[in-house]
């Protein structure tokens, strides 16, 4: 009789934990759905600090429900030198850039998602540590607030090695 009661209590405890996890609550044992994202970001920042550059350019397609098309971002000496539309070379209005600037800016967007306890965060990084594809969903219960980017090209520019 006591074994049956103990099994029922164990099953009830497991069911409760599963319901908490499915409902978006934090896991009660100190584990966090963003632990892996946090560690991946730390490792990517470390690789970038070790092997990165202060001058580069990349082409990026924002992932959002905002109708923004692909843009080319040029960074020189650690500062954004230009942001232009990839298809026509026209300047991108600052209001549409949404933090797509230096690699450090991209890291900051990912860190913000972690700090704000985003419901979903997926990020892939290059061997240099550059965030190549990022998808952020801040809240499962809000439609169309997702944001991210997909980088199609990344290159270190000559000014990075003093050949300009």
Image (cartoon, helix red, strand yellow):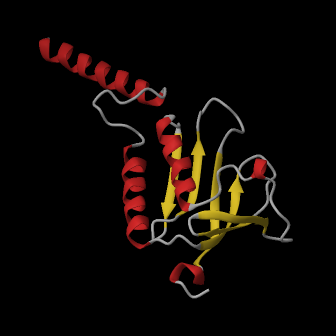
Q: Is residue 163 above or below residue 95?
A: below
On the rendered structure, is 90 left or right of 135?
right
Indicate the position of residue 108 as horizontal and vertical percent values.
Answer: 53, 49
Indicate the position of residue 151 as horizontal and vertical percent values.
Answer: 63, 66
Residue furthest to the bottom in view is 163
Q: Quadrant of the C terminus?
A: bottom right
Marks counted in the figure total 0
**Pick the front one: 27 or 150:** 150
- Residue at position x 53%, y 41% in the image: 113
Specify the quadrant of the image occupied by residue 162: bottom right
**Pick the front one: 125 or 23:** 125
- Residue at position x 31%, y 19% in the image: 12
Q: Is residue 28 above or below residue 154?
A: above
Indicate the position of residue 143 as horizontal and vertical percent values.
Answer: 70, 35
- Residue at position x 68%, y 38% in the image: 145
Indicate the position of residue 15 as horizontal and vertical percent values.
Answer: 36, 24
């Amino acid at each position: 009789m006591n074994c049956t009661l103990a099994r029922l209590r164990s099953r009830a405890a497991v069911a409760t934990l599963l319901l908490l996890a499915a409902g978006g609550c934090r896991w009660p044992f100190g584990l966090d759905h963003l632990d892996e994202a946090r560690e991946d970001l730390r490792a990517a920042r470390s690789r970038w600090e070790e092997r990165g550059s202060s001058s580069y350019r990349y082409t990026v397609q924002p992932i959002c429900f905002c109708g923004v098309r692909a843009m080319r971002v040029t960074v020189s000496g650690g500062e954004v030198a230009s942001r232009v539309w990839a298809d026509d070379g026209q300047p991108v209005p600052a209001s549409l850039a949404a933090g797509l600037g230096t690699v450090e800016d991209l890291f900051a967007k990912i860190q913000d998602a972690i700090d704000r306890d985003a419901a979903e965060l997926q990020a892939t990084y290059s061997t240099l540590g550059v965030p190549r594809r990022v998808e952020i969903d801040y809240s499962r219960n809000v439609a169309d607030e997702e944001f991210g980017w997909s980088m199609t090209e990344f290159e270190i520019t000559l000014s990075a090695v003093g050949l300009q």
